[in-house]
Image: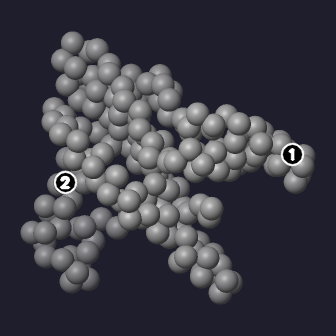
Amino acid sequence: MSIGPVQLLVLGFRHPNFHGEIIAELERLRASDTVRVIDALAVYKDADGELEAEHLSNLTEAEAIEFGSKVGALIGLGFDGEAGAAAGAQIGAAAAEDGVSVLDEPGTWDVLADIPPDTAAALILIEHHWAVPLRDAIARAGGFRLADGFISPLDLVGIGLISAEEAKELHDLETA
Protein backbone atom coordinates (compact mmCIF):
# COMPACT_ATOMS: atom_id res chain seq x y z
CA MET A 1 0.00 0.00 0.00
CA SER A 2 1.37 3.41 -0.95
CA ILE A 3 0.72 6.13 1.61
CA GLY A 4 -0.17 9.60 0.38
CA PRO A 5 0.52 12.95 2.03
CA VAL A 6 -0.72 13.13 5.63
CA GLN A 7 -2.32 16.27 7.05
CA LEU A 8 -3.49 17.21 10.54
CA LEU A 9 -6.67 19.28 10.62
CA VAL A 10 -7.46 21.12 13.85
CA LEU A 11 -11.03 22.42 13.88
CA GLY A 12 -13.09 24.41 16.35
CA PHE A 13 -16.87 24.59 16.74
CA ARG A 14 -18.91 27.23 18.59
CA HIS A 15 -22.21 25.89 19.96
CA PRO A 16 -21.70 22.61 18.07
CA ASN A 17 -24.71 21.09 16.39
CA PHE A 18 -23.49 17.73 15.11
CA HIS A 19 -25.80 15.51 13.06
CA GLY A 20 -23.27 13.01 11.70
CA GLU A 21 -22.72 15.00 8.52
CA ILE A 22 -18.95 15.33 8.97
CA ILE A 23 -18.50 11.60 9.63
CA ALA A 24 -20.72 10.80 6.64
CA GLU A 25 -18.56 13.01 4.40
CA LEU A 26 -15.36 11.40 5.67
CA GLU A 27 -16.90 7.97 4.98
CA ARG A 28 -17.90 9.09 1.48
CA LEU A 29 -14.33 10.25 0.82
CA ARG A 30 -13.08 6.91 2.13
CA ALA A 31 -15.48 4.95 -0.08
CA SER A 32 -14.09 6.76 -3.13
CA ASP A 33 -10.52 6.11 -1.88
CA THR A 34 -9.89 9.85 -1.87
CA VAL A 35 -9.10 10.46 1.81
CA ARG A 36 -8.52 8.06 4.67
CA VAL A 37 -8.90 9.02 8.32
CA ILE A 38 -5.82 7.65 10.05
CA ASP A 39 -7.01 8.90 13.41
CA ALA A 40 -9.42 11.50 14.72
CA LEU A 41 -10.46 12.84 18.08
CA ALA A 42 -13.49 15.04 18.65
CA VAL A 43 -13.91 16.64 22.05
CA TYR A 44 -16.98 18.52 23.26
CA LYS A 45 -17.02 20.68 26.37
CA ASP A 46 -20.55 21.25 27.64
CA ALA A 47 -21.78 24.41 29.40
CA ASP A 48 -20.63 22.99 32.77
CA GLY A 49 -17.11 22.32 31.48
CA GLU A 50 -17.49 18.53 31.27
CA LEU A 51 -15.55 16.90 28.41
CA GLU A 52 -16.84 14.17 26.09
CA ALA A 53 -14.54 12.59 23.55
CA GLU A 54 -15.09 10.42 20.48
CA HIS A 55 -12.42 8.59 18.52
CA LEU A 56 -12.70 7.80 14.80
CA SER A 57 -10.67 6.00 12.18
CA ASN A 58 -11.90 4.50 8.92
CA LEU A 59 -8.92 2.27 8.20
CA THR A 60 -9.31 -1.45 7.73
CA GLU A 61 -7.35 -3.69 10.10
CA ALA A 62 -4.75 -4.35 7.39
CA GLU A 63 -4.42 -0.62 6.68
CA ALA A 64 -4.08 0.14 10.39
CA ILE A 65 -1.24 -2.37 10.60
CA GLU A 66 0.38 -0.87 7.48
CA PHE A 67 0.07 2.68 8.82
CA GLY A 68 1.34 1.50 12.17
CA SER A 69 4.45 0.08 10.57
CA LYS A 70 5.08 3.36 8.77
CA VAL A 71 4.49 5.36 11.94
CA GLY A 72 6.83 3.03 13.86
CA ALA A 73 9.58 3.61 11.33
CA LEU A 74 8.95 7.37 11.11
CA ILE A 75 8.99 8.07 14.84
CA GLY A 76 12.43 6.52 15.13
CA LEU A 77 11.77 3.39 17.14
CA GLY A 78 15.08 2.32 15.68
CA PHE A 79 17.92 4.63 14.70
CA ASP A 80 20.24 1.85 13.53
CA GLY A 81 19.86 2.35 9.81
CA GLU A 82 17.82 -0.11 7.80
CA ALA A 83 17.80 -2.74 10.57
CA GLY A 84 16.52 -0.17 13.08
CA ALA A 85 13.82 1.03 10.68
CA ALA A 86 12.75 -2.58 10.11
CA ALA A 87 12.58 -3.16 13.87
CA GLY A 88 10.65 0.08 14.30
CA ALA A 89 8.26 -0.97 11.54
CA GLN A 90 7.62 -4.30 13.28
CA ILE A 91 6.99 -2.60 16.63
CA GLY A 92 4.70 -0.04 14.96
CA ALA A 93 2.77 -2.77 13.15
CA ALA A 94 2.32 -4.71 16.39
CA ALA A 95 1.15 -1.59 18.21
CA ALA A 96 -1.38 -0.90 15.44
CA GLU A 97 -2.97 -4.35 15.39
CA ASP A 98 -5.87 -2.93 17.40
CA GLY A 99 -6.00 0.16 15.18
CA VAL A 100 -3.86 3.26 14.89
CA SER A 101 -4.55 5.64 17.74
CA VAL A 102 -2.30 8.65 17.51
CA LEU A 103 -4.97 10.88 19.08
CA ASP A 104 -6.31 8.54 21.71
CA GLU A 105 -6.82 10.69 24.80
CA PRO A 106 -8.31 14.15 25.32
CA GLY A 107 -5.28 15.09 27.44
CA THR A 108 -2.96 14.38 24.52
CA TRP A 109 -3.50 17.88 23.14
CA ASP A 110 -3.20 20.94 25.41
CA VAL A 111 -5.63 22.86 23.21
CA LEU A 112 -8.47 20.61 24.38
CA ALA A 113 -8.14 21.69 28.01
CA ASP A 114 -8.35 25.31 26.89
CA ILE A 115 -11.49 25.13 24.77
CA PRO A 116 -14.32 27.23 26.22
CA PRO A 117 -17.56 25.69 27.50
CA ASP A 118 -20.20 24.87 24.86
CA THR A 119 -17.59 24.41 22.16
CA ALA A 120 -15.91 21.47 20.50
CA ALA A 121 -12.58 20.74 18.89
CA ALA A 122 -11.67 18.05 16.40
CA LEU A 123 -8.23 16.82 15.45
CA ILE A 124 -8.32 14.76 12.27
CA LEU A 125 -5.22 13.06 10.88
CA ILE A 126 -6.00 12.31 7.24
CA GLU A 127 -4.12 10.71 4.41
CA HIS A 128 -4.66 12.22 0.95
CA HIS A 129 -4.75 8.93 -0.92
CA TRP A 130 -5.85 10.67 -4.13
CA ALA A 131 -2.42 12.34 -4.29
CA VAL A 132 -0.37 9.12 -4.50
CA PRO A 133 -0.34 8.85 -8.34
CA LEU A 134 0.36 12.58 -8.74
CA ARG A 135 3.15 12.53 -6.15
CA ASP A 136 4.69 9.45 -7.79
CA ALA A 137 4.53 11.04 -11.27
CA ILE A 138 6.23 14.17 -9.94
CA ALA A 139 8.96 12.06 -8.33
CA ARG A 140 9.51 10.07 -11.54
CA ALA A 141 10.02 13.38 -13.35
CA GLY A 142 12.67 14.36 -10.79
CA GLY A 143 10.41 16.80 -8.98
CA PHE A 144 9.95 17.40 -5.27
CA ARG A 145 7.81 19.55 -3.00
CA LEU A 146 9.22 22.97 -2.19
CA ALA A 147 6.23 24.21 -0.19
CA ASP A 148 2.51 23.80 0.16
CA GLY A 149 -0.40 25.58 1.78
CA PHE A 150 -3.98 26.57 1.33
CA ILE A 151 -4.72 29.84 -0.44
CA SER A 152 -7.17 32.18 1.27
CA PRO A 153 -10.38 32.74 -0.70
CA LEU A 154 -9.71 36.48 -0.37
CA ASP A 155 -6.56 36.06 -2.47
CA LEU A 156 -8.53 34.39 -5.26
CA VAL A 157 -10.52 37.57 -5.97
CA GLY A 158 -7.46 39.39 -7.29
CA ILE A 159 -6.85 36.75 -9.95
CA GLY A 160 -10.52 36.59 -10.97
CA LEU A 161 -11.18 33.04 -9.81
CA ILE A 162 -14.12 33.99 -7.55
CA SER A 163 -16.13 37.09 -6.76
CA ALA A 164 -15.52 39.25 -3.70
CA GLU A 165 -18.89 38.14 -2.29
CA GLU A 166 -18.03 34.45 -2.72
CA ALA A 167 -14.60 35.03 -1.19
CA LYS A 168 -16.08 36.74 1.86
CA GLU A 169 -18.56 33.89 2.38
CA LEU A 170 -15.81 31.26 2.07
CA HIS A 171 -13.42 33.23 4.27
CA ASP A 172 -16.11 33.62 6.92
CA LEU A 173 -16.78 29.85 6.80
CA GLU A 174 -13.08 29.04 7.15
CA THR A 175 -12.35 31.49 9.96
CA ALA A 176 -15.64 31.63 11.89
What colour scheme does the image use?
A: one colour
Left or right: where 61 falls relative to 139? left
Instruction: Depth check: give the residue in front, 116 or 131.
Output: 131
Query: Horizontal and vertical percent for residue 111?
Result: 41, 30
Vertical placement of residue 27 versus 155, above or below: above
Kind of residue at disc 1: Gly
Query: Horizontal and vertical percent for residue 109?
Result: 47, 30
Residue at which label 1 appears: 84
Query: Horizontal and vertical percent for residue 88?
Result: 78, 42
Vertical placement of residue 65 versus 121, above or below: below
Instruction: Name the residue located 54 percent from the left edge and 61 percent from the top edge.
Output: 5
Instruction: Name the residue located 70 percent from the left edge and 42 percent from the top edge.
Output: 93
Left or right: where 17 falls relative to 108? left
Residue 132, quarter of the rendered image: bottom right
In this view, the mark in front (2 or 1):
1
Kindly check if marks 2 and 1 are in contact, taking CB atoms under 8 A apart as contact: no
Instruction: Name the residue located 9 percent from the left edge and 69 percent from the top edge.
Output: 165
